[in-house]
């Protein structure tokens, strides 16, 4: 290597001057050995552009090992298990396809006689090998018309963030499965994800619509919560003051509060919901059925109900006293009748 290549101010991987990107790290023997290992393996699988990197690291002295720097992005690009697996897969498929050579058929001068031809023959038509079809990139959104539009690769961090947002909010199960291994923005580039711009825009529109719907639902939930609190306070104050309420009155007031909070009350009544929250949040409350079938239940406090029962008992006790007095008077009349011998005009005997 010459002096420019051994300069400690250059990234040993991309050979660019330190400071061109903000992510610059000091190297170590262990890290450079790891870079060399991955680069040599990928070079053996056909990525010959990594061979010069292996030679540069192999020629370093002990002193140069601790002087060189590298960019974090360059390091992650080389030390990448997924890229290593893809390189190995391509190498094996290329090797297997080159071994399975179909002998040329007579009478077909247009067909290549090269032994390296990997095309399979079915009948009288030439077809691409299975290995070649597996390398065709598809849109990550699993669109119904994958042939329309140009495929683009996710390469930037900002685009990776957009895909992470789609993964976290989408309702499309196929998209969730396709992005299952994407946990960081850089993972999109590591997995070589491809997309159509129209598909990306469509899913982002759906995402924006779902967020808007969520905001509307959230606002409605807040309005209902406020209405519940207000109606509970109103019912509690009325019961404490000794008033008796009906469920129809409470329901009408609740609908009015919902309307004030810009919440659609709907066409049906809310008595079941109101009974539930009143029973859960107000102590000593009783629901008393009306003796008339066309009237709603009455809502009273246990204290008021106890006062009403006591008053009823007092009324019952007065009737008993009157009966006792009447019985006593009848006895006295019978006794006086037996003693008196005269008449009312002359009671003397």
Image (cartoon, helix red, strand yellow):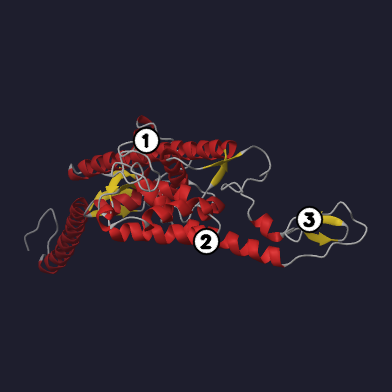
Asked whether the beta carbons under mark 3 and mark 1 sit within 8 Å of each other, the answer is no
Q: Nearer the viewer, residue 288 or 284?
A: 284
**How far across and how far down the image is residue 282, in percent?**
23, 51
**How far across and how far down the image is residue 45, in percent?**
54, 60
**x 43%, y 48%: residue:** 168
Closer to the N terminus: mark 2 or mark 1? 2
**How far across and how far down the image is residue 132, in percent?**
68, 56
Q: Mark 3 or mark 2, which is nearer to you?
A: 2
Q: Nearer the viewer, residue 248 or 148?
A: 148
Residue labelled with disc 2: 44
Q: Is residue 104 visible?
A: yes
**How far across and how far down the image is residue 263, in percent?**
40, 35
Closer to the N terminus: mark 3 or mark 1? 3
Residue labelled with disc 1: 258
Q: Nearer the viewer, residue 43 or 312?
A: 43
Q: Which image quarter holds the C terminus? A: bottom left
Residue 10 vertical placement versus 119 (above, below): above
Residue 97 lies in what quarter of the image?
bottom right
On residue 127, the disc is: 3
Q: CA distance from mark 3 to mark 2?
A: 29 Å
Closer to the N terminus: mark 3 or mark 2? 2
**x 87%, y 61%: residue:** 123
Residue at disc 2, secondary structure: helix
On residue 153, the disc is: none
Residue 125 lies in what quarter of the image?
bottom right
Residue at disc 1, secondary structure: helix
- Callout 3 crowding tier (Cα within 10 Å): few <14, some 14–19, many ≥20: few
Given the current orientation, which residue lies at the most extreme left position? Answer: 348
- Callout 1 crowding tier (Cα within 10 Å): few <14, some 14–19, many ≥20: many
Q: CA distance from mark 2 to mark 1?
A: 71 Å
- Callout 2 crowding tier (Cα within 10 Å): few <14, some 14–19, many ≥20: some
Q: CA distance from mark 3 to mark 1?
A: 68 Å
């Amino acid at each position: 290597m010459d002096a420019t290549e051994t300069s400690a101010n250059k990234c040993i991987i991309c050979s660019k001057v330190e400071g061109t990107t903000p992510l610059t790290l000091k190297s170590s023997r262990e890290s450079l050995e790891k870079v060399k290992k991955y680069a040599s393996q990928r070079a053996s699988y056909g990525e010959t552009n990594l061979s010069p990197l292996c030679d540069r690291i192999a020629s370093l002295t002990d002193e140069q090992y601790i002087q060189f720097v590298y960019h974090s992005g360059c390091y992650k690009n080389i030390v990448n298990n997924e890229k290593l697996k893809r390189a190995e897969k391509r190498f094996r498929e290329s090797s297997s396809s080159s071994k399975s050579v179909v002998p040329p058929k007579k009478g077909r001068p247009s067909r290549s006689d090269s032994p390296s031809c990997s095309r399979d023959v079915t009948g009288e038509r030439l077809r691409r090998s299975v290995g070649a079809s597996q390398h065709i990139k598809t849109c990550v959104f699993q669109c119904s018309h994958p042939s329309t539009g140009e495929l683009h690769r996710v390469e930037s961090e900002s685009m990776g963030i957009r895909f992470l947002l789609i993964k976290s909010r989408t309702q499309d199960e196929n998209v969730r499965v396709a992005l299952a291994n994407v946990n960081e923005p850089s993972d999109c580039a590591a997995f070589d994800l491809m997309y159509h711009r129209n598909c990306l825009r469509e899913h982002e529109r759906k995402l924006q619509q779902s967020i808007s719907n969520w905001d509307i639902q959230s606002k409605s939930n807040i309005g209902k919560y406020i209405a519940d609190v207000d109606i509970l306070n109103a019912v509690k104050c009325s019961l404490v003051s000794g008033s008796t309420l009906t469920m129809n009155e409470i329901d009408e007031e609740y609908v009015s509060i919902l309307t004030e909070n810009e919440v659609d009350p709907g066409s049906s009544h809310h008595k079941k919901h109101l009974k539930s929250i009143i029973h859960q949040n107000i102590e000593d409350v009783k629901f008393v059925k009306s003796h008339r079938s066309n009237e709603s239940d009455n809502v009273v406090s246990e204290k008021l109900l106890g006062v009403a029962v006591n008053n009823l008992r007092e009324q019952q006790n007065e009737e008993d006293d009157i009966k006792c007095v009447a019985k006593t008077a009848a006895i006295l009349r019978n006794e006086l009748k037996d003693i008196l011998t005269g008449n009312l005009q002359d009671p003397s005997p």
